[in-house]
Image: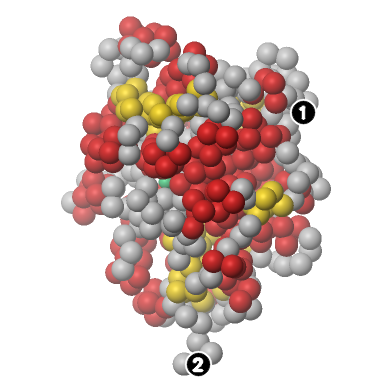
Amino acid sequence: MKNKIPTRIYLTEDEMPKHWYNLRADMKDKPDPILHPGTLQPVTAEDLAPVFCKGVIDQELDETTRLVPIPSDIQDFYRAYRPSPLIRAYYLEKMLDTPAEIYYKFEGTNTSGSHKLNSAGPQAYYAKEAGLTSLTTETGAGQWGTAMAMACGFYDLKLTVYMVKISSEQKPYRKALMEAYGANLIPSPSNTTEAGKKILEVDPNTGGSLGCAISEAIERAVKTDKCRYVLGSVLNHVLLHQSIIGLETKTALDKYGIKPDIIIGCAGGGSNLGGLISPFMGEKLAGKSNTRFIAVEPASCPSFTRGRFAYDFGDTGKTTPLIKMQTLGSGFIPSANHAGGLRYHGMNSTLSKLYKDGLLEARSEVQTEVFDAALKFMKGEGILPAPESSHAIKAAIDEALECKKTGEKKVILFGLSGTGFFDMTAYTSYNNKTMSDQIPSDADLERGFASIPNIPQNI
Ligand SMILES: *Cc1c(COP(=O)(O)O)cnc(C)c1O
């Protein structure tokens, strides 16, 4: 047993990362710049200043600094719940009878239940540092709102969360948790903003949407003194903060000389996947490894596998700057029966570029099969996975079973982005077989594509 790799590989506090890693700095072909929607010129820090706080704007626009020091205050914040466990899936391997080695990095041990706290902490810190007194944001499934509520509680900032109305009704415990941390929760659409009022006039009984909640949160931030807006995925500064996941994983694996052949993550806006793969992708770009990277998305919202690579808006209200990304169109509305998150129409620009250049693979999975995989995993490993994370589990199991066929002893690493404790409604519908799979038709996708702005795409 002496040389056996431990089931949980730990890092000491000294081994914890002191820098985030900015993958864009090592990309020869960088993602296209974010454009101002009016002038179609690259956005400047000044353009973004009314909405975001300075610290994150600088990070968003910086594509040359490789290693960005993590302020010591944020290192302390991370120490409260990190390192997250890196686990060798011995029990799952045995269950699958595969020669593959499977590892997963579990981000669901903190109270918010997902990796989102890794960026919520820094975003609250930079707001505090800039002398702001409050922040606004939106939340759909509730993980990001909870993470921001925790971070704002820690840094003593006021937080207003616009939570998609239907979601706030379906997930009362998420609401209770955010309020316990001191957040002001407003079901969206609401009559606290012009954007919300407009939508309520047309449809007073609407359950709301993420796009509308974003518009409300931005409007409130812009109109409130010493207040800014924060976003939990998609943007490159979020990817930078999430690189803590990949850096910890790499340090831990390096201690045992383990080199992953395949790295897998679920993808909504791309932040947990991007964070996990960043340092490993950096090695691949430098010609030092031949790792395969796989993004897994729901078949109901397939922005990689069936989307277009185009400049598009980040919100349904078409108020944000334009991002060149894999997109289904900001007007695309995924089927309401899809459980959990991963419902965003677009994808982080860096990951979109890597996909376009053939460095990142992608596949889509239907939710009943994703839950089949989740149940296998939880029986073996004892951890209840979030529905989002279970997309990665599905692909990891498939790759491990492929190894069983070929007899190859590959090393598979995947990101387990969160816990499923707040998603028991989805597990209930899986258990009583009311869960179904909805794959958008080509006509559904065409309706979404029609909302992509008609501008020259090769600027
Ligand atoms: C938000 C969330 C995701 C999707 O967001 P990404 O930015 O793609 O990582 C995935 N898993 C969990 C548990 C989440 O909370």
Q: Quadrant of the C terminus?
A: top right
| Mark whose residue sits in front, 1 or 2 | 2
CA–CA distance in space, label 1 to label 2: 57 Å
Which residue type carries mark 2? Lys
Measured along the vertical axis of the image, is residue 305 above or below residue 195?
below
Percent position of residue 195, x then y: 43, 12
Residue 39 in the image, given as x and y percentages of width and height: 73, 14
Q: In this view, does 339 lie to the left or right of 395?
A: left
Horizontally, is 246 left or right of 83 in the view?
A: right
Q: Is residue 346 visible?
A: no
From the viewer's side, name the closer residue of 360 and 341.
341
Question: Considering only order in the chain, which callout, 2 or 1, is on the residue closer to the N terminus?
Answer: 2
Rendered location of residue 97, percent (x, y): 41, 80
State if disc 2 and disc 1 touch (CB < 8 Å).
no
Task: Please tell me in which quadrant of the rendered image residue 283 appears.
Answer: bottom right
Residue closer to the observer: 176 or 270: 176
Q: What residue type is labelled 1?
A: Asn
The residue at which mark 2 appears reads as: 2
Q: Which residue is drawn at 28% across and 31% down?
A: 168
- Which of these two is toward me, 308 or 159? 159
Disc sitting over residue 384 in the figure: none
Residue picked out by circle 1:
458
Secondary structure of the residue carrying tag 1 is loop
Up the image or down, 76 lies above or below 292; here it is above
Residue furthest out toward the right = 28
Name the residue located 49 percent from the left edge and 13 percent from the top edge.
223
